[in-house]
Amino acid sequence: MRKRLIVGAIAVVVIGVAAHLISQPQDGTLEWHKDRYLRERKKLERRTILDCLERSYVKVCRPRNYRFRTLSGDALLRHQTALIRLGFLEEKRVDVTNHLGGLLSAILTEGREIIPREREPFTQLSAPLSIIIPIEGVEVIAPSQDVPVWVRLICEADAKIPPDPRPKRSLRLTAPDRLPGAAALDDILREGPDVRRGASNSWATQ
């Protein structure tokens, strides 16, 4: 009787494992890339069990000079690229006239109330941090059916910002060795203390 119970339990476990393996999406399919994308995003957001254990260890033991595990987004980018190629995700740039970097969080919150919950983790909005640019664009990567929603929300947020009366200018950095007068500056610094002292006096009289 006991042997039959053991054999039956083993059979149930084997059947369960086999069913789990069969239900897994095949490598390279749309569902496989979606599953791997969500796994990698969970890792980058440090929401795995290992991350919870690591935070608990640091909080309780307080080790000195402890460094959290370094993470890479390469795998996430590969699956994201595959999902774009397969047509599930769409990448779009929305040109705006104002700086929306600080409003992206509010836009995401508003969008989450519209799009289905199962597609929410696949959405990414990004904008340049610098505001010294003539025209800023918001990069949208989201499921194809949700892109029009995000475009509308971004354009509405851009339209609500009052126009800035100041002219927008672009910031251009030049390599130091190409700055006008760089060679002359080197010559001045090599001349000696009298030249530098004279230069400081001329600054003080301005």
Image (cartoon, helix red, strand yellow):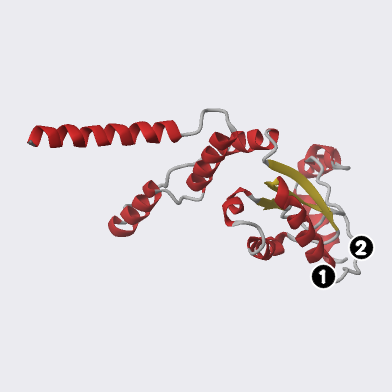
| 37 on left or right of 188 | left
Look at 90% across and 67% down and name the residue there. 166
Q: Amino acid at mark 1?
A: Lys
Which is closer to the viewer, label 2 or label 1? 1
Q: Amino acid at mark 2?
A: Pro
Residue farthest to the top?
A: 27
Of the image marks 2 and 1, the number of the one nearer the N terminus? 1
| 201 on left or right of 48 | right
| 129 on left or right of 25 | right
Residue 72 seen: no
Look at 31% across and 53% down and name the residue there. 57
The numbered dot on residue 160 is 1
Judging from the image, what secondary structure is the residue with disc 1 in? helix
Look at 42% across and 47% down and name the residue there. 68
* 56 w.r.t. 87: above or below: below
For the N terminus, the quadrant is top left
Q: Position of residue 155 (x, y in %)?
A: 81, 60
Residue 90 seen: yes
| 72 on left or right of 10 | right
For the C terminus, the quadrant is bottom right
* 3 w.r.t. 148: above or below: above
* 26 w.r.t. 193: above or below: above
Viewer-closest of 177 and 204: 177
Q: Which residue is mark 2?
A: 167
Viewer-closest of 108 and 134: 108
* 104 w.r.t. 91: above or below: below
How packed is label 2: few (under 14 Cα within 10 Å), some, or many (20 or more)? few
Viewer-closest of 62 and 75: 75
